[in-house]
Image (tube, rainbow, N blue to C red):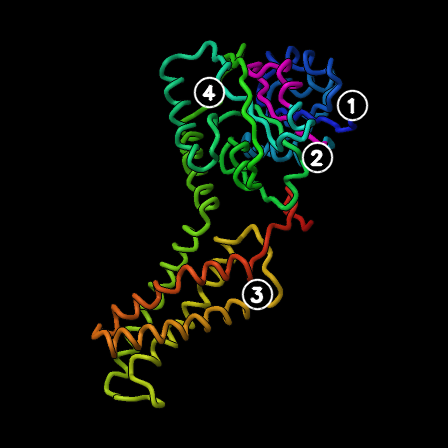
């Protein structure tokens, strides 16, 4: 369906054995005329029912709820995509309210929230409420929303250009919010009702996946933490090579006019720099495309900062009276922030892939 300014709306619903709920849900959605995409991993007749009611049905990959949602969003034709559950816990009547702020250009994402003023949760036990609150509390430092575990949200599809989404858990809303770096987000109160029929898909395994997902998103959101981990690994490599080499050169007062501790430091640092480049390319900036000649840019940055490292090392040893090993550790730490800034701004630029990972 297209609204008055021409934006098409797509509804993506992942399903797994929801034959008891799907007809009631679709009959309420279809009256709005939206495109409805069902991504089905069922072994019952959910898909058949959905097709008979006019929904577009694709077979899921059997890789979980998160992957199903990503697959549905990829093939959706809407300018705005709404994601919701199939168990009737999310009311189709709330969809117009959910998409309205996006249509009015007030935000890029809206979240059907259970934890803002005016919301209501029906049919949940006290333990389930506690678990849900705790899960949302853990997500807040990463996503900065009250209901970080909501499965009912709408997003402007264009903001996903350049974003690689990974189905690390079923909470794709968190993935989108963090990976797309969305700041214009509005949480809207909803009435959330426990599923009408069928069994909940929530398991301890999914809970563990959610915690792992939060950790990965935290590393992504606070990218410098990843850079620090890579730097720590590079530090171990550096020191592991540096110390044995100092033993090789220890009997030489000078080597090519330099004090014995400097040549080993150059050699060990170059090895660590090469390792760090590849680790950062995969881990820290894996969602970005490196600029042309990125390795040589990185090498140039590292060598330049290495010269500064050596000056610090020289000053600490010859003028500060600090032994070479701890002095080398201090010198490495001194230039860490500068290296991160250069890598972030000059070597790996902004995201440049679509939701499916292909170049923009």
Residue closer to the observer: 307 or 267: 307
Q: Which of the two discs, 4 and 3, sits closer to the camera?
A: 4
- In the rendered image, residue 183, in percent from the top left (x then y), is placed at 55, 37
Q: Label 4 vs label 3: CA separation?
A: 45 Å
Left or right of residue 352, residue 325 in this image:
left
State which region is magenta: 79-98
> Which numbered dot is residue 4?
1
120 in the magenta segment: no
Identify the residue position indicated by label 2 in the image.
75
Instruction: Write the residue at 48% across / 53% down.
Output: 284
Q: Earlier in the sequence, mark 4 or mark 3?
A: 4
Q: Are marks 2 and 1 in contact (CB under 8 Å)?
A: no
Q: Label 3 vs label 2: CA separation?
A: 33 Å
> Which numbered dot is residue 115?
4
Q: Label 3 vs label 1: CA separation?
A: 47 Å
Instruction: Write the residue at 48% across / 30% down.
Output: 145
Tag 2: Cα neighbours inside 10 Å, few (<14), some, or many (≥20)?
few
Q: Earlier in the sequence, mark 2 or mark 1?
A: 1
Q: Are marks 4 and 3 in contact (CB under 8 Å)?
A: no
Q: Earlier in the sequence, mark 4 or mark 1?
A: 1
* Secondary element type, mark 1: loop
- The quarter of the rendered structure image containing the N terminus is top right
Residue closer to the observer: 36 or 97: 97
Left or right of residue 24, residue 251 in this image:
left
Tag 1: Cα neighbours inside 10 Å, few (<14), some, or many (≥20)?
few
Identify the residue position indicated by label 3 in the image.
294
* Secondary element type, mark 2: helix
Q: Are marks 4 and 2 in contact (CB under 8 Å)?
A: no
């Amino acid at each position: 369906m297209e609204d008055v300014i021409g934006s098409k709306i797509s509804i993506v619903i992942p399903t797994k054995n929801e034959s008891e709920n799907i007809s009631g849900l679709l009959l309420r959605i279809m009256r709005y005329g939206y495109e409805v995409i069902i991504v089905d991993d069922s072994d019952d007749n959910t898909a058949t029912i959905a097709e008979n009611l006019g929904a577009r049905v694709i077979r899921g990959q059997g890789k979980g709820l998160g992957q199903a949602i990503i697959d549905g969003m990829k093939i959706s034709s809407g300018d705005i995509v709404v994601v919701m559950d199939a168990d009737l816990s999310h009311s189709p009547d709330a969809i117009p309210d959910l998409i309205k702020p996006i249509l009015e250009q007030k935000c890029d994402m809206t979240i059907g929230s259970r934890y803002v003023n005016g919301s209501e949760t029906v049919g949940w036990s006290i333990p389930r409420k506690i678990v849900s609150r705790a899960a949302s509390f853990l997500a807040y430092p990463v996503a900065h929303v009250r209901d970080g575990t909501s499965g009912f949200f709408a997003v402007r599809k264009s903001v996903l250009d350049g974003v690689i989404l990974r189905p690390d858990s079923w909470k794709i809303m968190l993935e989108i919010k963090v990976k797309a770096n969305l700041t214009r987000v509005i949480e809207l109160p909803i009435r959330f009702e426990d599923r009408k029929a069928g069994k909940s898909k929530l398991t301890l395994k999914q809970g563990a996946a959610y915690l792992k997902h939060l950790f990965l998103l935290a590393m992504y959101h606070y990218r410098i933490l990843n850079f620090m981990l890579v730097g720590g690994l590079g530090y171990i490599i550096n020191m592991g090579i540096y110390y044995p080499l100092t033993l090789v050169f220890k009997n030489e007062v000078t080597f090519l006019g330099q004090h014995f501790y400097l040549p080993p430091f150059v050699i060990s640092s170059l090895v660590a720099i090469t390792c760090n480049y590849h680790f950062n390319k995969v881990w820290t900036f894996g969602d970005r495309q490196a600029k042309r000649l990125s390795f040589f840019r990185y090498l140039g940055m590292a060598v330049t900062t290495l010269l500064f490292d050596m000056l610090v090392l020289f000053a600490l040893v010859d003028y500060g009276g600090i032994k070479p090993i701890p002095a080398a550790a201090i010198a490495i730490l001194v230039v860490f922030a500068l290296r991160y800034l250069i890598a972030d701004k000059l070597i790996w630029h902004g995201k440049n892939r679509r939701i499916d990972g292909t170049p923009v």
